[in-house]
C-alpha cells in the first residue's frame, strides 16, 4: 500500500474507534482499541516502539517511544487532550526524522469531531 492508501485505512479505523468509544478516555485505551481495529483490517502494527536517539555518534540511554508504527511506514501518535498544541506536531515531526519516515498521523481523541482532529504530518 502507498502512503495515501494506508493513511486512508488508518483514518477509517480511527473513526470506527471514536464512533464506538467517544471522547474522554485515556490515550492508552484508544491505543489498544486502535491496535485491535488496525489488525482486524489486516495491517501490521508495532506499539510503543523505541526510537533510539543518537547524539554525536552515541546512542543515548533514554530512548523515545512512539505510539504506533503501521506497516513499518506510517507513524501514528495518539493524544487525548483538550486541544492539540504546536509541541505535539513537533514531537511527531521529530519521530519522523529520527525514524527516517515520510508520513505520520497525529490523532486527538478528546474532541467533538474526530475527522477534524486527525492531522497528517509530512517529513
Image (tube, helix red, strand yellow):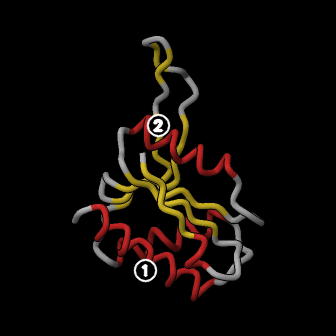
- The percent coordinates of residue 58 (x first, y second) are 46, 14
Image quarter of the C terminus: top left
The residue tagged 1 is 12
Q: Residue at x 44, y 55 (%)?
A: 104
Secondary-structure class at tag 1? helix
Do residues under tags 2 and 1 come within 8 Å of each other at their CB atoms? no
- The percent coordinates of residue 9 (x first, y second) are 36, 75
How crowded is the residue under tag 2: few (<14 C-alpha within 10 Å), some, or many (20+)?
some
The residue tagged 2 is 51
Looking at the image, residue 38 sits to the left or right of residue 112; the answer is: left
Q: Residue at x 58, y 88 (%)?
A: 20
- The percent coordinates of residue 28 (x first, y second) are 62, 63
How crowded is the residue under tag 1: few (<14 C-alpha within 10 Å), some, or many (20+)?
some
Q: Is residue 30 above or below residue 54?
A: below
- Between tags 2 and 1, which lies in front? 1
Q: Is residue 120 above or below residue 89?
A: below
Q: Is residue 7 above or below residue 65?
A: below
Secondary-structure class at tag 2? strand
Image quarter of the N terminus: bottom left
User: Looking at the rendering, which quadrant does residue 74 occupy?
Assistant: bottom left
- The percent coordinates of residue 42 (x first, y second) are 28, 73
Q: Earlier in the sequence, mark 2 or mark 1?
A: 1
User: Looking at the rendering, which quadrant does residue 57 occupy?
Assistant: top left
Q: Residue at x 77, y 66 (%)?
A: 82
Of residues 57 and 106, the one drawn nearer to the viewer in this rendering: 106
Disc 2 from disc 1: Cα separation: 26 Å
Amino acid at each position: 500500500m502507498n502512503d495515501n492508501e494506508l493513511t486512508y485505512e488508518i483514518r477509517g479505523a480511527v473513526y470506527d474507534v471514536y464512533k464506538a468509544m467517544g471522547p474522554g478516555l485515556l490515550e492508552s485505551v484508544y491505543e489498544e482499541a486502535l491496535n485491535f481495529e488496525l489488525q482486524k483490517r489486516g495491517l501490521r502494527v508495532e506499539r510503543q516502539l523505541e526510537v533510539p536517539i543518537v547524539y554525536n555518534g552515541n546512542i543515548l540511554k533514554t530512548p523515545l517511544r512512539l505510539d504506533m508504527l503501521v506497516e513499518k511506514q506510517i507513524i501514528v501518535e495518539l493524544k487525548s487532550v483538550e486541544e492539540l498544541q504546536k509541541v505535539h506536531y513537533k514531537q511527531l515531526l521529530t519521530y519522523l526524522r529520527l525514524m527516517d519516515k515520510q508520513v505520520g498521523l497525529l490523532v486527538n481523541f478528546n474532541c467533538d469531531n474526530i475527522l477534524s482532529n486527525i492531522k497528517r504530518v509530512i517529513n
